[in-house]
Image (cartoon, coloured by chain):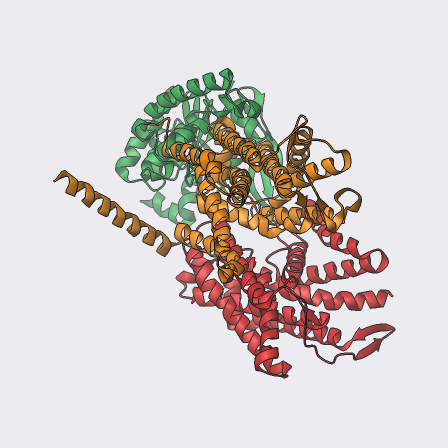
Amino acid sequence: MKKYLDTRTIIFIIIMAGMAVAPFVTDPYQLRVLISCELNMIFAMSLNLLMGIGGTVSFGHAAFYSIGAYTTACLWYHFGWDYSTNFIFVILITGLAGLLLALPMSRITGRYVTIITLSFAEIVNLIIRNWDPVTLGQMGIVGIPNITLFGYRFKTKIQFFYFALIFVILTYIFLKWLVESKLGRNLQAMRDDSIAAEAMGIKLFPNKVIVFTISAIIAGIAGSLYAHLMTYVEPATFNANLSFNCISIVVVGGLGNFTGTLIGSLFLTILPEYLRRFEFLFKYRMIAYGMVLVIVMWLNHSIPGLKLKQSVQKFFARLLHRKTADQEV
Amino acid sequence: MLLQILVNGLSQGSIYALTAIGYSLIYSILQLINMSNAAVFLTSAVIFYALYTSLTGSSIALTFILTLMAAGMIGYIIEIIAIRPIREKGDSNTYALISSIGVKTILEQICQGTFGSEIKQFPTLLDGKYIDLFGARTSAIQIIIILTTLCILGFMSWFTQHNRVGRGLRALSQNIRACHLMGMPVNTLIGISFAVGSMLAAVSGVAYCMYLKSISISVGSAIGNKAFAATVLGGIGELKGAVVGGYILAIAENLVSGYWSMSASNFISFGILILVLIIKPTGIFGKKEQKKV
Amino acid sequence: MSLLEVKDLTIRFGGLVAVDNLSFTMEEGQVTSLIGPNGAGKTTVINLLTGFYTPNEGQVILDGEDITGNPTDVVVEKGLSRTFQNIRLFSNMTVEDNVLIGMQHRIEYGSFLSLFPNPRKNSWEKKAREEVGQILQRVDLSEYRYDRSTSLPYGKQRKLEIGRALAAQPKILLLDEPAAGMNPVEKRELSLFIKSLLKDVKGILLIEHDMKLVMDISDKIVVLNHGAKICEGRPEEVQSNPEVIEAYLGRKGARNAASK
């Protein structure tokens, strides 16, 4: 039977509860790490919507993140607007960018998606680098203040933390709604077999456009929060590695598994920060990201990997079984 | 002026073309965009630099040969570790692609960790010698690059058309499973194609740094992206497409930076790429995919 | 008026004429079969009918309505639903979800209403899930409802594909080689099942290689060779047609068969 509270939801609630009490026990530095963790969660969930549900691997998702970050930064810099107004523009502009990227998707299949998303990110980065009057080019925009909502400026990072946490929860719930709806089902059908989906009367193109737009908007929101967290934005931050790290998080957590994405974000954000203590390891911390990609792919998508996984699972199952058997005796 | 641009474009295009062939070769066999190619480009340049400054002293030829061997081995190992297990399950090659991104990250990080982030001087051949080619000031290294590339291209076309291994690779690009059934050493052949692709990237990496007379950690990603654009422009999976795409892209870039501005030349490559993808997504030589129902 | 009328349907791929001036009709309440040697263009006909390919010439008229060259989603709404030669289930989705996809065009709330809970969405989802129960009962898969579609055994996957097509409530069901890879027992069961489907749909167009099955359940058979129709009629008429025998056995084989 279908359960209303499945394991994933329970784990989600546990993680969120843990996050909610975290500020009481962390120092400012750890809090900052947790906030960037939250941003990664939102960012990676948006990518997981595209990859896991939409079946499109975007290799340039950082583009939307950077558009979101720059939208709010530029609006603050040029007009001094507060986040409540900027937020609307972030949604509009990143949504438009997602729409723009989705348009060529009607003409292409498979491998060209990789190419288009990569080039799109590169083009966005080039525009940010060179559009001096608006983005201030290579210099970037500095001194962005903490989030201001309707004239009320957040005073502490703790407020920022809870504000971002609300977004994490909202995103998660929103995606859950989406996945369990007609739209979500149609997207998954297209992911599994686009020809059969077409034969069942699903219009591929509009659905692609919708999923790209929604994913772009969520990534843009994460980016806009990032600008206010870091207090500066510069083009060098939003490179291809940002997209690849995001892919790592999604892949570690599992495609289409949003709870997994949350765990992946926690793991892959906190681990490099933890490595900071060891200078040598910190220097090579990105290797961890690379290894994680290779290893997870190996475990999930290769025959020896799957066999290993199975036998480990069996081993633990037997271990657990024996324990319960002992207790019964 | 135009001739000068052409010469510069040709030498730059040679570098794009060599790396682009690496992308195309592996794509034609596995339908995999091997993201680690750009990292091998960088890694080879770093290996060359390390060998030259520490071990082999001043012999460029010896260093070059050692670098080539190392690059070939790296390519072969990448295939064994990161690609082979995934490809053997016959799953979607998106996973192999992600795995190759992992390899790229690892290689780049190792380079960055060992090499550091500063720009260093790179050994070059016949420094300061220039030849006047009908009014175009051409450095000796440019001519060497163009000639070497032409030789390699000639060799590659002989290799794929008339050599036993090359024939095997072409058969693989048609149908891997059938090759397996025919008793061909599929794994070795794919390993070789990775090794060849990496060696080409190595030639291109070393040549590029010689041309710049300097090396920094960012050379890989810059050229990697351009070579990738060239591959797409020419039609991914087609060797001649990679070459033509590389030259067109480099000449267009040099035209724009010569007559217009430097920063616009960065846009032109991706502008061309967008146009191609909108007008003819399969690239110049690419064949159209038939929708199979 | 016929249920489905195909007039002078032609499609060319480059120089190859895959379907050549094909005309036939389907009547209500009948199983019509499309047979022919490998490469005769049978699947191409289905792709033409369902809008995957656009014909170069000719017309497809469903229940008096011209549906020639309509995109697949319109064709499904008009009442044609198909299965595939090589099973094409949505592999990472449950059996229930597969059937829900089949009926997606009848679930009347759009993408925007998908994004948040609302009464319209809730009531449609509830209704749809009830209907899934009925369909799964119809194809005898109720116990697998929450299983992954690809975890089903082969024969059940075929049935699920038919169930998914039925969920669209089509006028005509197009079955592309449903018996492929089945053993004789399964085939017998399948032929009864297909016959019983006429209670749910107005007509069935069947493509099949297994002659026994075709002869058993068809009311009418259309024989294709090299894209062109060579014969049309009741099973016994087709069986005795010399051109058909020649197409299947070759000229020499046909002579041998005749002399026996």
Left or right: B104 in relation to C136: right
Chain C image colour: green
Q: Quadrant of the C terminus of chain C?
A: top left
At x 50%, y 39%, the residue is A191
Q: Nearer the viewer, residue A131 or A191?
A: A131
Chain B image colour: red
Image coords of residue A240 (percent x, y):
61, 51
Q: Is B263 situated above or below B80?
A: above
Q: Residue furthest left?
A: A329
Image coords of residue B224 (percent x, y):
63, 60
Quadrant of the image occupied by residue A12: top left
Chain that the image shows in orange: A
Q: Is B135 situated above or below A79?
A: below
How many dots with numbers?
0
Q: Nearer the viewer, residue A5 or A157?
A: A157
Residue A301 visible in rendering: yes
Left or right: A178 in relation to B217: left
Image coords of residue B137 (percent x, y):
83, 73
Q: Nearer the viewer, residue C69 or B144?
A: B144
Q: Nearer the viewer, residue B233 or C38?
A: B233
Image coords of residue A138 (percent x, y):
73, 51
Quadrant of the image occupied by residue C194: top left
Residue B285 visible in rendering: no
At x 74%, y 55%, the residue is B266
Left or right: C188 in relation to A202: left
Quadrant of the image occupied by residue C139: top left
